[in-house]
Image (cartoon, rainbow, N blue to C red):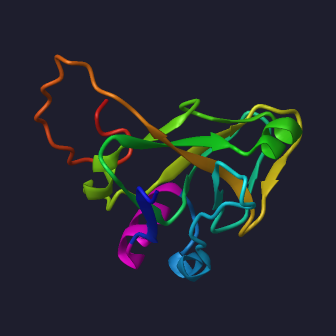
């Protein structure tokens, strides 16, 4: 059953978010890979870093992936670090688990998935351009009977406080 589609954000959106977070240029846009599963038994879709980054111990970075995802209502995309980065570098997501809601696709930032990571290890962490560093899993969720939210999303990353 297909419940979602990955696609690139627009080149201008990627350039804007990259400029706000890094000292790189938008030439990396052409190297963006859509997330895929590594094997037929894999639950997670691997996210690749569009540029090389080195984090010293205790450093953090927000990585603009260049990816957005259309998700059917009733499902959420959860983002986790790949286990190899957790073991080698004690890499963690700054928000522990990234939550990509179905209405994030329509956010002002085109639903650009930005993954904030930290190096909690004691050695430099290098994520090479094109290397798989995070994974996303689609999960069904349910609502409480009393749920009557009618507010629409506008902002992007961290927009609902």
The number of numbered discs placed on residues in the rendered structure image is 0
Work out whether residue 41 or residue 110 is closer to the camera in this orientation and state it: 41
In which image quadrant can residue 75 be found? top left
- Residue 120 lies, with reference to residue 60, above or below; the image says above
- Residue 130 lies, with reference to residue 69, above or below; the image says below
Taking the spot 30% from the left edge, 39% from the top edge, the residue there is 159
Taking the spot 34% from the left edge, 28% from the top edge, the residue there is 142
The residue range painted magenta reads 10-21
Work out whether residue 20 or residue 82 is closer to the camera in this orientation and state it: 82
Residue 110 % position (x, y): 32, 62
In which image quadrant can residue 137 be found? top right
Examine the structure image and report whether residue 109 is included in the region drawn in magenta: no
- Residue 154 lies, with reference to residue 19, above or below; the image says above
Examine the structure image and report whether residue 20 is included in the region drawn in magenta: yes
Taking the spot 28% from the left edge, 34% from the top edge, the residue there is 160
Q: Looking at the magenta stretch, what is its main secondary structure? A: helix
Taking the spot 39% from the left edge, 66% from the top edge, the residue there is 16
Work out whether residue 114 or residue 5 is closer to the camera in this orientation and state it: 5
Quadrant containing the C terminus is top left
Residue 116 % position (x, y): 57, 43
Residue 86 % position (x, y): 79, 37
In which image quadrant can residue 89 be found? top right
For residue 28, side relative to residue 39 (left or right): left
For residue 28, side relative to residue 56 (left or right): left
């Amino acid at each position: 059953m297909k419940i979602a589609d990955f696609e690139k954000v627009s080149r201008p959106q990627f350039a804007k978010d990259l400029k706000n977070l890094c000292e790189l240029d938008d030439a990396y846009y052409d190297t963006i890979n859509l997330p895929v599963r590594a094997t037929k038994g894999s639950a997670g879709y691997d996210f690749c870093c569009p540029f090389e980054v080195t984090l010293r111990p205790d450093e953090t970075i927000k990585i603009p992936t260049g990816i957005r995802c259309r998700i059917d209502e009733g499902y959420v995309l959860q983002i986790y670090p790949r286990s190899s980065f957790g073991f080698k570098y004690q890499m963690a997501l700054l928000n522990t688990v990234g939550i990509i809601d179905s209405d994030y696709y329509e956010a002002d930032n085109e639903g650009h998935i930005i993954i904030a990571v930290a190096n909690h290890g004691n050695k430099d962490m290098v994520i090479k351009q094109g290397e798989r560093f995070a994974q996303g899993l689609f999960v069904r969720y349910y609502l409480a009977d009393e749920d009557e939210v009618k507010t629409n999303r506008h902002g992007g990353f961290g927009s609902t406080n």
